Amino acid sequence: MVRAAMLYGLETVSLRKRQESELEVAELKMLRFSLGVTRLDRIRNEYIRGTAHVGRLGDKVREARLRWFGHVQRRDSEYIGRRMLDMGLPGRRQRGRPKRRYMDVINEDMKLVGARVEDAEDRDRWREMIRCGDP
């Protein structure tokens, strides 16, 4: 139940690496508490995840992001969500390092799972490609 609350809405957010690791730390704290394990017991995170039968939270966030992206890609080009994905902002950006954009994160995720934008048209194949599955 806690995991579902943590994942709610994250399919539309481009998380930084630090934010993703903070979410995983919070989830592991909750898992340790529910299993009655403390940090002083020095039990590895992988063992705790295996005991609780859950995978990494980052993998589930990636799966949710790609599932939502595939859903939007299958819609017609007039759908507002699809237009927002394809939209570019006019003008110049501010100085400094560019912020992490949603499509940059999606492209990283697709590269990680070996998917392409065209693959999203076939719903069953797309689901099979992006599924990370809990142990």
Image (cartoon, rainbow, N blue to C red):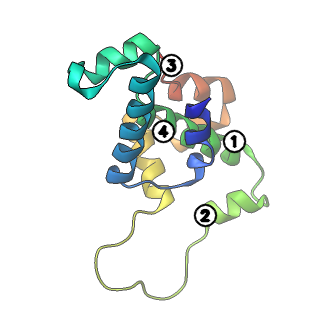
Neighbour class for label 4 at 10 Å: few (<14), some, many (≥20)?
many
N-terminal of the two: label 2 or label 4?
4
User: Which residue is identified by label 3?
Assistant: 133
Residue 70 location in percent, x, y? 63, 41
Circle 1/circle 4 CB separation < 8 Å:
no
Q: Provide the secondary structure element on which disc 1 rests.
A: helix
Q: Tag count in the figure?
A: 4
Q: Measured along the vertical axis of the image, is residue 20 above or below residue 133? A: below
For the residues marked 1 and 2, what is the alpha-carbon distance in whole angstroms?
15 Å
SS assignment at label 4: helix
Q: Quadrant of the C terminus?
A: top left
| Kind of residue sitting beneath label 1 | His
Q: Earlier in the sequence, mark 2 or mark 3?
A: 2
Residue type beneath disc 3: Gly
Q: Which residue is mark 2?
A: 86
Q: Residues within 10 Å of mark 1 (few under 14, many from 20)?
A: some
Residue 20 in view of the camera? yes
Q: Is residue 41 above or below residue 5?
A: above
Residue 115 percent across, percent down from the top left = 47, 35
Above or below for 128 versus 7: above
Please tell me in which quadrant of the rendered image residue 88 appears. Answer: bottom right
Q: Choose the circle earlier in sequence order: 3 or 4.
A: 4
- Does residue 118 show up? no
Q: Classify the position of the N terminus by image quarter.
A: top right
Query: In the image shown, does 111 or 1 lie closer to the viewer?
Result: 1
Hey, what amino acid is under mark 4? Arg
